[in-house]
Amino acid sequence: MPRPPGMRRSASPATPSDGEPPEGSGPGSPPDTGPESAPSSTGARARGRRGGPSRPLQLLRQDLVDFYAGVGLLLKPAMPLPAEVIVRQSEDCADAWVRAAEANATIRRALEGFSTASVFGALLMAHIPIAVAFQVQLGRLPINHPIAGSIKPEIERTMGMSVEEAIRRQQEAQDGQAAPASA
């Protein structure tokens, strides 16, 4: 009896005990198109999630190095020591992930998915300094905040003075406004 589409075969042996092939498996029967008929080592799983060819591991490695460097760059203004260590370790960490991906197909698939996500992460990280600039300009982020340090050259170029000088002048202006109110 033919089985409904999508239903798996039972775990019974392929050849019944009488030596005859199972019903529907003779030379004139249609090929089995169920999930168990797909080759397991070279099928869609080996090609990656979208069915295309897998990315070479060296490209995945570079994506990981770039990711670690981006995290380090993002953390540098607020946490310089961990940021420096992250950047310094980026290649060693990426190499370790690549070795793990060579040994384990699940890790490789996860890295391939991460690689796609890292493209969007890079887009987001590229726009963070723009958002920081708006926050500083609108007064929502103090100019001496560690995150504002990521755009220090732009602040200095735009203001025509060092960030330290701008902070000093800002403080003097605030002190000058507070003094007449108390007199």
Image: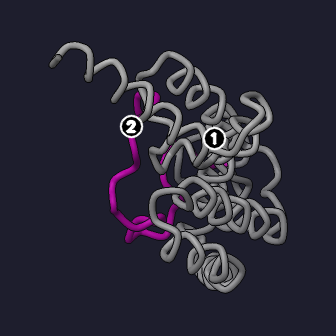
Judged from this view, the residue extending furthest toward the left is 182
Q: Nearer the viewer, mark 2 or mark 1?
A: 1
Relative to 25, residue 166 above or below: above
Q: Earlier in the sequence, mark 2 or mark 1?
A: 2
Task: List the residue tagged with mark 2.
Answer: 7
Residue 39, disc: none
Quadrant in which the N terminus appears: top left
The amino acid pointed to by label 2 is: Met
179 lies left or right of 51:
left
In the image, 13 versus 6, the foreground residue is: 6
The amino acid pointed to by label 1 is: Met
Residue 32 painted magenta: no
Q: Position of residue 96 (x, y in %)?
A: 62, 85
Report the magenta residues as a range: 1-26
Residue 3 painted magenta: yes
Crowding at dot 2, Cα within 10 Å, few <14 / some 14-19 / many 20+, comes out as few
Q: Position of residue 159 (x, y in %)?
A: 72, 29
Q: Position of residue 131 (x, y in %)?
A: 57, 26
Q: State the residue at coordinates (63%, 58%).
A: 73
Q: State the residue at coordinates (72%, 39%).
A: 161
Relative to 156, residue 141 above or below: above
Quadrant in which the C terminus appears: top left
Q: Secondary structure at mark 1?
A: helix
Q: Position of residue 36 (x, y in %)?
A: 53, 53
Task: List the residue tagged with mark 1.
Answer: 125
65 lies left or right of 72:
right
Judged from this view, the residue extending furthest toward the front is 183
In the image, 106 versus 183, the foreground residue is: 183
171 lies left or right of 114:
left
